[in-house]
């Protein structure tokens, strides 16, 4: 990735065969379409919105691009936001509020009903899972609901900005075009979860399959091709250029959904006056830490992807 507009590659999606990507930070919303042969920018979509810290890119059920303005390193924002770039029409801005105080987040999904689904980036504790009760309307802010948490298993993959082993910090998320598989990535790995009936909360209460993504300078972007190929992308860091790499057939490794009874959320922040899960949310899906047997994809299977760019 040698285009300076994508030097801090942070989010990717594939829409109607086109690969779109964005950098984090910046003073306006910009999403770029990338040529697969040389990683050159061939189209750009913008919105007259001044974001705080955009971090991830997702696609809605209608094909709109959702830009997640979710970054909050100092954890002091009163609201976060998503900017929606529809296929036709004017961009929309929806502000969101957490029920338990500010969080830093770099991962965004949009479920089949058009609700933003945020996965937070937590140090030393499970990531929080948040979404709105309904698709957001207007600028808001719309309240986010805490619907669970995600504790990723240990990993021995090397990589990341500090050259560590097995990061558990969530830096991006993606879903296949049919919604049957979701992936959550860290600096060192991608974790695959099969989805049944579009239920993301239930999906994250299953043991995941690991796809090692070693030696990425600062891996934050992830996406699926229509054929199930997993794409991963990294920022350029300390002069080491980011790349887009591919793991063919990765989605097929996720397997079939498995019913796992969720556990109560561990060490969830206490909120004064919090009414608890809404009555329309089934008790069995009220949230839980993902634990259980780790299904590890062997390096030979997971790293057969070809390098792109």
Image (cartoon, helix red, strand yellow):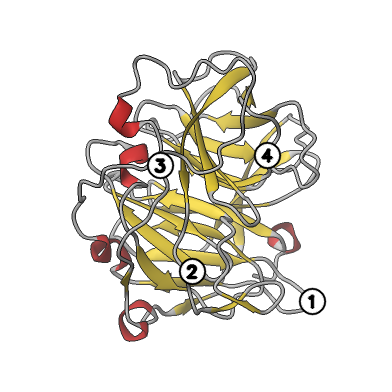
Real-space Cα distance between discs 3 and 1?
38 Å
- Of helix, strand and loop, which one carries label 2? strand
Is residue 3 toward the left or the right of residue 292 in the image? Answer: right
Q: Tag on residue 103?
A: 4
Label disc, if present, on residue 238 of the rendered structure: 1
Mark 4 or mark 1, which has the lower sequence index? 4
Q: Mark 2 points at which residue?
A: 189
Q: Tell me the quarter of the image containing the C terminus.
A: bottom right
Q: Which of marks 4 and 1 is in front?
A: 4
Identify the secondary structure beneath mark 4: loop
Which residue occupies 71% across, 70% down?
236
**Residue lying furthest bottom:** 300
Residue at 23 percent across and 36 percent down: it is 197
| Pointers 4 and 3 in contact (C-beta within 8 Å) | no
- Please tell me whether mark 3 sits on a helix, a strand or a loop: loop
Res 63 → quadrant:
top left
Q: Which of 41 and 173 is in front in this view?
A: 173
């Amino acid at each position: 990735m040698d285009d300076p507009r994508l030097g801090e590659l942070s989010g990717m999606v594939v829409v109607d065969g086109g690969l779109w990507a964005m950098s984090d930070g910046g003073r306006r919303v910009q999403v770029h379409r990338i040529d697969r042969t040389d990683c050159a920018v061939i189209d750009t979509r913008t919105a007259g919105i001044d974001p705080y810290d955009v971090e991830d890119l997702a696609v809605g059920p209608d094909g709109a691009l959702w830009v997640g303005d979710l970054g909050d390193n100092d954890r002091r924002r009163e609201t976060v936001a998503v900017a929606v770039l529809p296929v036709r029409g004017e961009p929309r801005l929806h502000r969101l509020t957490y029920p338990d105080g500010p969080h830093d987040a770099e991962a965004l999904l949009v479920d089949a009903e058009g609700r933003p689904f945020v996965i937070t980036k937590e140090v030393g504790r499970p990531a929080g899972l948040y979404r709105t009760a309904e698709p957001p309307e207007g600028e808001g802010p719309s309240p986010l609901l805490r619907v669970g948490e995600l504790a990723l298993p240990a990993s021995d993959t090397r990589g990341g900005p500090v050259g560590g082993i097995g990061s558990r910090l969530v830096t991006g998320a993606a879903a296949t075009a049919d919604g049957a598989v979701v992936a959550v990535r860290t600096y060192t790995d991608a974790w695959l979860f099969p989805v049944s009936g579009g239920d993301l909360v239930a999906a994250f209460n299953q043991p995941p399959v690991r796809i090692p993504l070693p030696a990425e300078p600062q891996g934050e972007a992830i996406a699926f091709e229509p054929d199930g190929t997993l794409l991963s992308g990294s920022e350029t860091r300390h002069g080491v250029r980011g790349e887009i790499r591919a793991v063919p057939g990765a989605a097929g490794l996720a397997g079939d959904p498995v019913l796992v009874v969720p556990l109560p959320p561990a060490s969830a922040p206490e909120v004064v006056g919090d009414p608890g899960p809404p009555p329309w949310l089934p008790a069995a899906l009220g949230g839980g830490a993902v634990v259980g047997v780790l299904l590890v994809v062997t390096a030979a299977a997971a790293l057969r992807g070809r390098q792109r760019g």
